[in-house]
């Protein structure tokens, strides 16, 4: 096939990058924007305290359950077709959520929205890997992709607080409708038609992987409230693991597997998956416990707490801008270890905040360090996870990246909520108990970041430096 002229190729790459980043930012924003709006959703639709958790859990469960199927569908059926289908599902579900008249309608629509996100998240990443050559060109694109993830997660908390406090929580979902509509129009014209590898999707593998991932995610989510000794928690996790094991065994015999097991043959990719889980476990826990810190201890309003995350957002953006230059100068490995170290130190510092502390000294200052680590970490992890992947398996590899992303955040937070609850037990008054729990949770998050740094040091090789 003749090569596209360089200026034309670069224009196409730039346009594809804008579509991909906007899509991924929308998905990430939607994951976090709901958190600071939960009290308003509870009051507006009459959720019970336990039922309210399912506003997030329904999305998480569906997102995690359909991830591998959504990822491989792009390889087999064509990424443009699958991307547009996932975007249409996400758009329609967002509209239903924003207009939901009852709790039941909202929860069903959140599950459907999660399925759309499970298609979009890996497809956007695979679109980057096939449009940008491995090396510095791809590293620059992945740095911007990682910046979208880091900025989106913290900016969502800011916008969620502003919308819930000043307008309505519904705005956070309804805004997706025009954004997704513009993206659909642009993608239909910009993305090249890609027929896919053809053949049939592994339907039995899709059922096993979806049920297995859903069971595992449900058990982990349930553990946060019911505990790790709860029979239903243990039963669903065991069932999920058994189904995933059956899925992996069956994949070895498939001619067109949903998950090519050769993706695990690279020690570096396995290291990137594990380190990513630690990274997300630390960062999701940071967002949860720092929200508790600002609203429960420093008594900030939801809007003030949302705006309180701006130091992380700004430093994530600035660090991501400098990332390609740092990787060229020092290589991938040292930058990644520095990112984990910055996050760990920032979390330990944040844990020192006291009930009568000042926001600027106790919260904003350590958030600057965490923001630097957040901006530097995700891109090298993504590059390591996608290095050496064949174009026809980019979707499956992207799915594994997103599985690690999803499971890391869910499992990390569920584990540390158990630590949080144990630290509060027997402590009084309530404010002192909350402070004790937050300290334990933040120290646990710092430990996850430290473990991620050690995994990176042991398994992820440095990228080539500039000669």
Image (cartoon, rainbow, N blue to C red):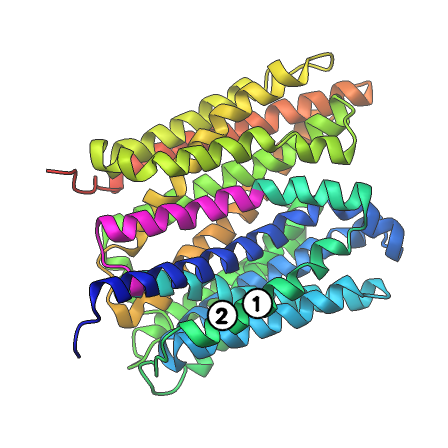
The residue that mark 2 highlights is 186
Question: In front: 270, or 46?
Answer: 46
Vertical position of residue 435 compared to residue 49: above or below: above
Residue 272 left/right relative to 390? right
The residue segment tinted magenta is 131-153
Residues marked 1 and 2 touching at CB (< 8 Å): yes
Q: CA distance from mark 1 to mark 2?
A: 6 Å
Instruction: Please report the residue visible at 51 percent of the width from the left and 57 percent of the height from the top.
Output: 22
From the top left corner, tell me how far across and down residue 270 is, in percent.
31, 51
The residue that mark 1 highlights is 182
Vertical position of residue 237 compared to residue 65: above or below: above
Residue 31 left/right relative to 55? left
Outermost residue on the bottom side: it is: 199
1 in magenta: no
148 in magenta: yes
Vertical position of residue 278 compared to residue 263: above or below: above
Instruction: Please report the residue visible at 32 percent of the width from the left and 43 percent of the height from the top.
Output: 380
The number of callouts visible is 2
Rendered image: mark on residue 353: none
Residue 145 left/right relative to 464? right
Instruction: Kindly indicate the quadrant of the structure image that contains residue 254.
Output: bottom left
């Amino acid at each position: 096939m003749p090569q596209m002229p360089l200026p034309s190729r670069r224009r196409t790459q730039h346009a594809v990058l804008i579509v991909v980043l906007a899509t991924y930012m929308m998905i990430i924003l939607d994951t976090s924007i709901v958190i600071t709006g939960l009290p308003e959703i509870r009051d507006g639709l009459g959720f019970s305290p336990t039922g309210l958790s399912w506003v997030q859990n329904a999305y998480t469960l569906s997102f995690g359950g359909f991830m591998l199927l959504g990822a491989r569908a792009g390889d087999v059926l064509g990424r443009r077709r699958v991307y547009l289908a996932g975007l249409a599902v996400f758009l329609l579900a967002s509209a239903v959520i924003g207009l939901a008249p009852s709790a039941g309608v909202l929860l069903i629509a959140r599950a459907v929205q999660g399925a759309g996100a499970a298609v979009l998240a890996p497809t956007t990443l695979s679109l980057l890997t096939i449009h940008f050559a491995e090396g510095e060109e791809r590293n620059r694109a992945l740095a911007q992709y990682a910046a979208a993830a880091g900025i989106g997660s913290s900016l969502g908390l800011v916008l969620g607080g502003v919308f819930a406090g000043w307008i309505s929580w519904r705005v956070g979902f309804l805004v997706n409708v025009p954004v997704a509509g513009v993206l659909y129009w642009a993608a239909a014209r910009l993305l090249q038609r890609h027929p896919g590898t053809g053949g049939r999707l592994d339907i039995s593998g899709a059922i096993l992987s979806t049920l297995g991932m859903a069971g595992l995610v449900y058990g982990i989510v349930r553990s946060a409230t019911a505990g790790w000794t709860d029979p239903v928690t243990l039963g669903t996790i065991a069932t999920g693991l058994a189904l995933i094991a059956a899925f992996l065994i069956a994949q070895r015999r498939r001619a067109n597997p949903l998950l090519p097991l050769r993706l695990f043959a690279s020690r570096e990719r396995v290291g990137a998956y594990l380190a990513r889980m630690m990274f997300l476990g630390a960062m999701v826990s940071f967002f949860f416990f720092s929200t508790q810190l600002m609203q429960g201890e420093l008594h900030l309003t939801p809007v003030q707490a949302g705006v309180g995350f701006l130091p992380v957002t700004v430093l994530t953006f600035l660090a991501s801008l400098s990332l390609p230059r740092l990787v060229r100068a020092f290589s991938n490995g040292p930058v990644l270890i520095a990112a984990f170290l910055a996050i760990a130190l920032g979390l330990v510092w944040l844990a020192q905040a006291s009930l009568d502390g000042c926001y600027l000294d106790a919260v904003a200052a350590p958030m600057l360090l965490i923001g630097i680590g957040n901006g530097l970490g995700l891109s090298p992890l993504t590059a390591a996870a996608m290095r050496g992947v064949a174009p026809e398996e980019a979707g499956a590899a992207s799915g594994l990246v997103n599985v690690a992303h999803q499971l890391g955040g869910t499992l990390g937070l569920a584990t540390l909520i158990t630590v949080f609850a144990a630290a509060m037990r027997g402590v009084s008054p309530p404010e002192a108990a909350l402070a004790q729990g937050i300290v334990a949770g933040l120290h646990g998050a710092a430990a996850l970041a430290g473990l991620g740094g050690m995994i990176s040091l042991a398994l992820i090789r440095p990228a080539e430096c500039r000669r």
